[in-house]
Amino acid sequence: MEQEKTVGSQIQEESNDPVVHKRVFSLPKALALLALAVLVTLAVIGIWLGMIKFKPARGLAGSEFIGLTNIQRFLQSPYVLRLSRNTLVSWLVQALAGFAAAAPLLLWIKASHNAGRALTKTCVCLIPACLPTVGLFYLLLKLPHPQSMFVDVNYYYGVYAAMTVFQTAGFIAFCGGLFEYLGKRGIGGGMRWGLSAAALILALRLLTPNKDATLFAYNPMVYEAADTLDTYVYRTGLQNADYSFSSAVQSLKAIVQALLGILPASMLVKLSRKDETRITIPDQKGSVSTWLFAIVVWLVIMVAASGYIFGLDRLMDQPEASAEAFITATGNATVLGSMAITAITAAFSGVFAGTVAYGFVQLNRTNQKGFSAAVIVWVSAGSFLMAEYIAVRNLGILNTLMPQVVLSVFEPQIICITIALTAALRMAPERQTRGLTAGLMFIGSALSWGSYFNNMIYVRDRSLYSLSLLLRELLIGASSGSGEITSQAELLARDAMTPTVALLVILPAILLSAAGALCLVSAFRKEE
C-alpha cells in the first residue's frame, strides 16, 4: 500500500511540475484553442453568409444583406421533411448497425482477465474504426450483381450501413473497452459507462452523417432515401454555386445540432467526472500474446482482402500475368503521383490532427464547463462547409494541399476518438498522457490516407488527386483519357489499375491505424 501511495504521489508531483507543463503542453493546448477559435470564426462567417446574397466579386462585406430570407426559403421548400427524415434515419441505421457489429468485440474485451489485455484489445478496435469508406465501397462492388444495390431504394440503407458499420463498431468497441480498462483498474463503472459514453458521443453527431459514405451512396435514383442535409448542401452550394442558400441551411442545421447536443454533452460531463471513490490502482500485467494474436488476425484479413480485391479468379488463372499487371499499374505515373500526394498529406495531417487532439484532451480533462462547451462547438460548428470553402478561396489556397491538412482536425472519427479519450481520462486526472500524442498522430494519418472528401472539395488539378479520390474517380466511371490501348500488357495494366489503387488505399490505412493502436497501448503502459 505504501509503495502504491509513493508511486501515486510521484505521478501527482510530476503532473504538477510547471516546467513540464510549460515545455510539453503549451503548443498542443495553443493549437487546440486555435482550432476552436477557427471553428467559432467559421460558424460566424457561415451564419453571415446565409444572411446575405453573396456575390464573389463583392465579397462578404459588400454583398446585399437579406436577413432570414434564405432560411424561410428552405423551410417553405417541399424538401425539408424528406431531408430531415433521411438524415435522422441514416444516423439511426449507422448507430444501430454499429452497436450490433460491436457486440462480439465488446464480449472479446469483456473476457479479458486483466487490465492489460483489455487495453490491448481496446486499442486494436481502432483498426476497423479507421478503414477507408472508399475501400469498403469497392468491396461492395465485388459482390454479385452490385448495380441493383445502388439503384434500388430498398437496398440503400443496407449499403449505407455496410459502408459505415466497421468504423462505427470499431469506435463503439474502443469507447466501451477504454472504460472497461479503467474499470478493471478500479476507476468508474466499466463497460456500461463506456457504451453510454459511445451512445452520447454518437448522439452529438446526430445531424452530421459520414460524408464519404453519404456522397458515395446517393444518386438521383435513390434520392427518396439518400438525400440528406449534407448532400443537399453539397449539391446546392458547391455544384450549383448557391453559396448563401446552402450556408443558411448549414446554419440552421448547426444551430439545431448545438441545441440537441446540450443534453448528451451535459450527460457526458457527469458520466466522466473524477472518480472520488478510487483509493488504489491495481497492478497491470502486459499482454504480448493478445497483441500478437490480433496482429496475426489482421494479417490474415489483409492477405484475404488483397486476394479478394485484386481478383481471386485472376490470381488463380493467370498468376504471372496478374503479378506483371500489378507491377505495371503500380508503376503508373498517375498512381505514383497520387501515392506521393497521399503520403505527404497524411504525414502532415497526422502530425497536426494528433497534436490538436492531444491539446484538446489536455485542455478539457479537468475543465467541466469547458469540456461541455468545447464538445458542442466541435461537433456542431465543424459542419460549415460553405464557410470553409469561401475562406479557403479568399485565402488563395484553393487547389493546394493546405486545406486538407488544416481541416484534418475536423474529421468526425478523430473528433469522436478524442472526445472518448478525454471523457475516460477525466476520471483519472493524475495520469500522464504525453505518450498518446504519437498514437493520435498515426490515427490521424490513417484517417487522412483513406478520406477523399476534402481532396475532392479543394483540389481541381488531377496531379494533386489523392489515392482515395483517384479510386473514387475509377469507381464512378470517370475517365482520365486513357488513349488507345495497343498491347495486352497495357490492357492488363488498365484492368489492374482499380484493384491496385484499392489495395494502396486500404492496406496502408490498416498499417497506420495498427501503428497508432500499438503506440496507445505502449503509452498507457509506460505511464502506469
Image: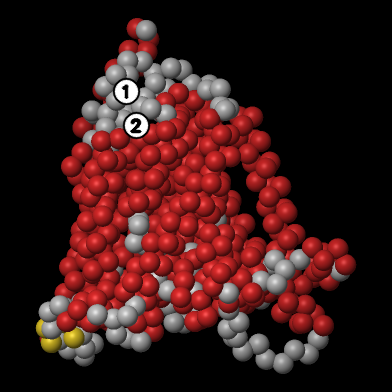
Disc 1, SS: helix
Left or right: 472 as drawn, with respect to 455: right
Residue 152 seen from this side: yes
One can see residue 405 in this view:
no
The quarter of the picture where residue 487 lies is bottom right
Inspect the image, locate mark 1, and give the three-letter code of the amino acid beneath it: Ile
Residue nearest the observer in this picture, 269 or 467:
269
**Which label's residue is closer to the chain start, 2 or 1?**
1
> On residue 11, which mark appears?
1
Vertical placement of 214 versus 219: above or below?
A: above
Quadrant assignment for the N terminus = top left
Q: Nearer the viewer, residue 290 or 273?
A: 273
Foreground of the two, 266 or 337: 266
Q: CA distance from mark 2 to mark 1?
A: 8 Å
In the picture, which quadrant includes the C terminus? top left
Secondary structure of the residue carrying numbered label 2: loop
Q: Quadrant of residue 60?
A: bottom left
**Is 98 placed above or below 103 here?**
below
Kind of residue sitting beneath label 2 = Gln
Q: Which residue is mark 2?
A: 432
